[in-house]
Structures are given as structure tokens and as C-alpha cells.
Image (cartoon, grey):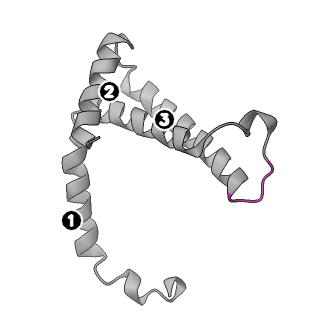
Amino acid sequence: MRIDDAQKEVDQWIKTVGVRYFNELTNLGILMEEVGELSRLMVRKYGEQSYKESDKHKEISDEMADILWVLICLANQTGVDLTEALRKNFEKKNLRDADRHKTNEKLL
């Protein structure tokens, strides 16, 4: 699925099934909650924390999708074209970081 298609599909779902968007600050709070849920699973799978019984059947991919969903909601609400934003971000990183990481001894 393309990013612009995802933005349209989320918008359609929100306006039909979801009734309406939560306000932007509510969605920002939800985004932070979802990032926290991903963090909890990542530190249990890749870090040193033990799994809680309630986390054992949760999927990292589902938590990432939840984050993407809410981010798309925020983009739709604020008029951000994520495809264009990502394209511009690549341009910025390619200019700023063209040689930066090649000389980082920590990465070699």
C-alpha cells in the first residue's frame, strides 16, 4: 500500500466507522501511548527485561501498525502529505549526512 493510499483509507475509515477524528492533542497522546507499547515489547524481546504474561502474545508488527495509524491520523488532521514529507526528509538527510556516517568509527 502506498502512503497516500493509506492516508485516504484511514480518512475514509475514520469518517465512516470511527465517526470522527479525535482532536489533535488526544491523538498525540494516543501516539505516545502506542510508542510506549512498542517500547515495552522491544525491551522485552531485544533487551534484558522479562516478558509479562500480558505481553507474551502481542506482536511488534501490530504495535508498529498502531503507531503508523495514529501518525496517519495526525497527518490527515494537520494537512500533511506524508509522501511529500518523506521525500523532503530523504533530500535533507542525503544532503546533511552524505559522508557523516562513513567516518563514524562506532559504525565501522
Could you tell me which quadrant the N terminus lies in?
A: top left
Q: Which mark is residue 50?
A: none
Q: How many marks?
A: 3
From the top left corner, tell me how far across and down residue 40 is, in percent: 67, 45
Residue 100 belongs to the span the image colors magenta: no
Residue mark closest to the camera, 2 vs 1: 2
Q: Which of 50 and 22 is in front in this view?
A: 50
Q: Contact, CB < 8 Å: mark 3 with mark 2? A: no
Q: Residue 66 carries which label?
A: 3
Residue 103 falls left or right of residue 57: left
Q: Disc 2 residue type?
A: Val
Q: Where is residue 55 in the image (x, y as percent from the top left)?
A: 72, 38
Q: Give the SS element for disc 1.
A: helix
Residue linked to disc 1:
91
Task: Give the residue drawn at x 36%, y 10%.
Answer: 19
Query: In this rendering, does residue 9 appear at all?
Result: yes
Q: What stretch is highlighted in magenta?
A: 46-50
Front residue of 50 and 23: 50
Which amino acid type is shown beneath numbered disc 3?
A: Asp
Task: Give how far across and how far down residue 84 sits, in percent.
Answer: 18, 49
What kind of residue is marked 1? Glu
Quarter-wise, where is residue 94 in the image? bottom left
- Tell me residue 108's x, y (percent): 50, 88
Give the residue drawn at x 50%, y 89%.
105
Cα–Cα span, label 1 and label 3: 27 Å
State which mark lies toward you, 1 or 3: 3
Q: In this view, does 22 lie to the left or right of 61?
A: left
Question: For the point 31% across and 76% down, which residue is it?
Answer: 97
Q: Which residue position is annotated with label 2?
A: 10
Give the vertical position of 89 relative to 76 (above or below): below
